[in-house]
Image (spheres, rainbow, N blue to C red):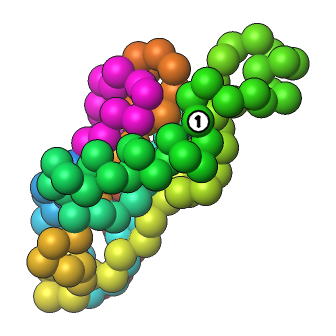
Amino acid sequence: MIYSEYINRETKGYTDIFDITDDVKRVVARSGVYNGLVTIAVSSSTSAIATLEFEPGLIADLKRALEVIAPVKGVYAHDEKWHDGNGFSHIRSSLIGASKTIPITSKSLLSGAWQQIILIDFDNRPRSRKVFVQVFGE
């Protein structure tokens, strides 16, 4: 069986982070899948899907680490070509990735107690993001 849904979020950009774990759990429950996999993906080159303990200190640490790796005010060839100022967001997105796959067992996500699924929007302006959730299994 394959079941699919979208989760929608309005974002502010600049590393706006959302915990979408409960949304994904609801999609898995509606799917009726007992054992299988769930894939969570965002169709965007300036956002990402990751897992993380969703707490304020770690959120701040992640933002600080990303600023070291790909600073907002860095110089990017992308910006020189397109003049849109979001080269940093493309780099951050490519490093973290646009999707995650998590096993399902006994109708539950096989994830750690402190492991949440997050959507991160890195772009330099607000966006409407659609997160695709697809459940495979029996």
**Residue 83 falls in image quadrant:** top right
Image vertical order of residue 47 relative to residue 69, above or below: above
Residue at the image point whose x is 61% and y is 42% from the top = 70
Q: Is residue 12 magenta?
A: yes
Residue at 22% x, 64% y: name it.
Answer: 53
Q: Say if residue 69 shows up in the picture.
A: yes
Give the percent coordinates (x, y) of residue 107: 15, 79
x and y, in percent, of residue 32 in the image: 18, 71
Residue at 84% across / 29% down in the picture?
A: 77
Magenta: main secondary structure equals: strand
| 104 w.r.t. 100: above or below | below
- Which amino acid lies under the numbered mark 1 shown in the image of this protein? Pro
Magenta stretch encompasses residue 57: no
Magenta stretch: give its range: 2-18
Report the front residue among 116 and 60.
60
- x 29%, y 63%: residue: 52
Q: Quadrant of the C terminus?
A: bottom left
Residue 117 placement (x, y as % from top left): 28, 59
> Secondary structure under badge 1?
loop
Residue 93 in sight in this render:
no
Label 1 sits on residue: 71
> From the viewer's perspective, is 96 left or right of 121?
right
